[in-house]
Amino acid sequence: MGTLVELIKETYDHKACLEIASSGCSDGACTRHNYQADTLLLYMSYSDEIIKYTSERLGYNFLSNLARDFGSPLKDNKDQDNFSWQEVVSACPNKDDYKHALVWKFIELVAKEKSLDH
């Protein structure tokens, strides 16, 4: 099994990557991974790669903030960082929605990378 980055780059051609990079997955450009069932399968198989790739480009704060967008009750404490990003994600009640959004963000980042390669 190859990497998910390779799989996404093979799945979407340059034109599709340009569309995904400019409009995002939520606008239907991500034709092969539109449904949550599809993205959850990717997350189950490639979660480590998704988290590593996304956090290297956007930071671990992105992961925490995304979990908060999906209802994680753990908030930033401005005086000190009480919660790790893992704790914030663990507390998220809408984990499937969170994982779906994270996979879409991953696909968008890979599509942007591929579109810049040409």
Image (spheres, helix red, strand yellow):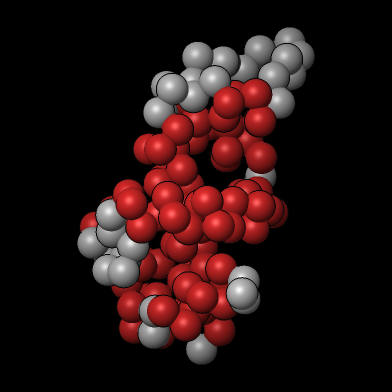
Q: Is residue 88 left or right of residue 93?
A: right
- Name the residue rendered at 33%, 52% in the picture: 37
- Residue at image coords 39%, 85%: 13
User: Picture coordinates of residue 49 (x, y %)?
Assistant: 64, 58
- The vertical placement of 75 against 15, above or below, is above
Residue 61 falls in image quadrant: top right
Front residue of 48/102: it is 48
Residue 46 lies, in percent from the top left, at 58, 58
- Number of dots carrying numbers: 0
Q: Which corner quadrant holds the N terminus?
A: bottom right
Residue at the farthest right position:
80
Residue 89 lies, in percent from the top left, at: 57, 29
Give me the residue at 32% from left, 49% from top.
36
- Side (left or right) of 82 relative to 42: right
Residue 57 visible, this orientation: no
**Which residue is drawn at the image coordinates 56% and 68% (left, top)?**
4
Examine the rendering and report whether any part of residue 73 can be seen.
Answer: yes
Which of the 4 image quarters holds residue 69? top left
Q: Position of residue 23 (x, y in %)?
A: 31, 62
Q: Point out the residue furthest to the left here.
A: 28
Query: Image height check: is 69 above or below 91?
Result: below
Q: Residue furthest bottom?
A: 118
Comparing 66 with 36, the one in front is 36
